[in-house]
Amino acid sequence: MTGVFRDLPGQDAVVAQLRRAAAGAAALLAGQRPEPGAMTHAWLFTGPPGSGRSVAARAFAAALLCPSGGCGECPSCHQVLAGTHADLLLVRPEGLSYGVKQTRDLVLRAAGKPTGGRWQIVLFEDADRCTEQAANALLKAIEEPAARTVWLLCAPSAEDLVPTIRSRCRVVTLVVPSSSAVAQVLIDRDGIEPGRALAAARAAQGHVGRARRLALDASAAKRRADVLRMPSSVTSLGSALSAAATLVRTAEEEAKAVTEELDEPEREALRRAFGEGSSGKGVAKAMRGMAGAMKDLEDRQKSRATRVKRDTLDQALLELALFYRDILVVQLDADVELANDPASLRKLASSSTPESTLRRLAAIMHCRELLTLNVAPLLAVEEMTLSLSEG
Ligand SMILES: [Zn+2]
């Protein structure tokens, strides 16, 4: 697959639908009659984590804004993929959810005319994190759309949005791509050796970005290995407690690595915007204004750090759950593709029963639930590792 849709392995039906819509949109711009029903102004991209919801939405945005329907090569395509295109508003929740103010500001900006003369696109990642008031503000905008504005919402499933919004969007459902389709992307685009690409693709369960990180970033691979050592190491109260501490610390370190990478460039951009380092009239005054803006930015960065920490710990728990699922697959001799190396599963599979594996899986899911209820991470994880250690 070529152009902006090339990062969507195994999503042929979705890609065909989006290409048709982009062609319809281009026909509208050219004053021609588009294929009936091909294009609409509000879209909802759904699919399990890692299936590529936001990748698909971003690719569609690029296809709408590109003069050649998403070539992947022109300045417009590059800007969309880098998130810097003037007609693309990329929205992520500032804290754990979208507030009403953030959404209202956005609705106002979305009503503007596209600077490039094509479309004004608003891409909402994690639209399921809208507060009720934010959802109401959003609904108004989708109900009475500006002529050239396209809304792209992403959420795990259509049920995660209130029915009033859901019913006004065309739903695009992504599937989990097969490991071999993901591996092929790593081989073709990143030049990763096939065996390694397939192992990473299996471990990432169809998540292209994560598979790429596991194959290319040694520290990500090491953190995963640390998480997966836990099942065989929690054999006593002491080891369970120390495993819990390690798991929470590892997730925090990973989250820190992710957010630090984002934080400094943002602060740098803000300083530049306020003209730090330059001299002349008005600079002193601007510098005073910068202090307030910097404080705002740091507050937002702090709440993002909280969110990333939570997501990262959840990712580790899902990996652990996948490990026990694989153990269960081995125990039941089921015909399911394993995410983990079979050699790492055999010993635990033969020394425990399917019943205890199911109980352990339930303990992990319970821990995830506690974390969404804001229970202190270490407490929730300790409770889980204690259950894992009981045979
Ligand atoms: Zn292009």
Image: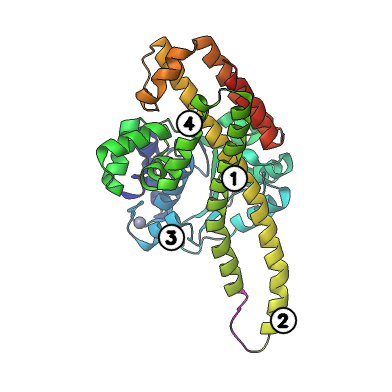
- Mark 3 and mark 1: Cα distance apart in space: 32 Å
Q: Which residue is mark 3?
A: 79
**Dot 3 lies on which element?**
helix
Of residues 337 and 38, the one nearer the viewer is 337
What's the residue type where badge 4 is placed? Arg
- Circle 3/circle 2 CB separation < 8 Å: no
* Left or right, residue 167 beside residue 184: right
Q: Name which of mark 2 and mark 4 comes first in the sequence.
A: 4
Please check the rendered image and state whether residue 215 is part of the magenta-colored stretch, yes or no: no
- Mark 2 and mark 4: Cα distance apart in space: 56 Å
Please state, as top left, top right, bottom left or bottom right, where the N terminus lies in the image: top left
Q: Which residue is mark 1?
A: 252
Q: Name which of mark 2 and mark 1 comes first in the sequence.
A: 1
What's the residue type where badge 3 is placed? Gln
Of residues 260 and 232, the one nearer the viewer is 232
Please state, as top left, top right, bottom left or bottom right, where the C terminus lies in the image: top right
Q: How is the image coloured?
A: rainbow
